[in-house]
Image: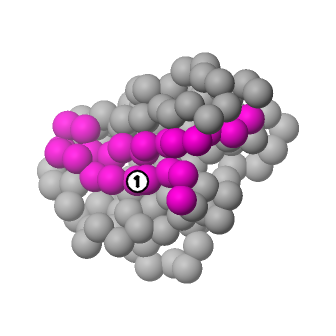
Amino acid sequence: QVHLAETGGGSVQAGESLKLSCEATGFIDNNYYCMAWFRQAPGEESEGVARIDSDGRTTYADSVKGRFTISKGNAKSPLYLQMNNLKPEDTATYYCAADPVGGACASRTLVSSYFNYWGQGTQVTVSS
């Protein structure tokens, strides 16, 4: 059974940086997983932030391109999100997600329903 847990959230000022980590248990080999970060602000729909496939190819939402970087780690900490130049509109709960088959990375856009495993979320608050 795969369990994911996000860490690294917090409250920062606009322009500052945060690095989110996704810790995992139950991963056999994270290289076969399609993994992603989603976020959801109060009263808004979930938004796909970034995605990385088994070959390291990445996809980003337009709103974070050039500021956020998704990367893979090891089986215990398989996913990171480096967030630079944070803006108040980045305020949300951030979730890591994994698809063990990898099909979630075949779609052109980030679709939350393609991911089987989710963390509980970590809050990121950016003040102006």
The colouring scheme, among rainbow, by chain, secondary structure or one colour, is: one colour
Horizontal and vertical percent position of residue 126: 68, 28
Quadrant for residue 43, please give it: top right
Q: Which region shows up in magenta?
A: 66-88
Three-letter amino acid code at the position of disc 1:
Ile
Residue 81 lies within the magenta run: yes
Relative to residue 39, is residue 103 drawn left or right?
left
Residue 90 lies within the magenta run: no
x 43%, y 35%: residue: 20
Quadrant for residue 91, please give it: top right
Camera-nearest residue between 66 and 42: 66
x 43%, y 26%: residue: 8
Horizontal and vertical percent position of residue 115: 47, 58
Mark 1 neighbour class, 10 Å CA radius: few under 14, some 14 to 19, many 20 or more: many
Is residue 5 visible to us here? Answer: yes
86 is higher (above) or lower (below) than 73: above
Relative to residue 62, is residue 98 drawn left or right?
left
Horizontal and vertical percent position of residue 17: 51, 34
x 41%, y 27%: residue: 7
Say which residue label 1 marks. Answer: 70
Q: Residue furthest right?
A: 43
Disc 1 secondary structure class? strand
88 is higher (above) or lower (below) than 36: above
For the C terminus, give its image quadrant. Answer: top right
Camera-nearest residue between 98 and 126: 126
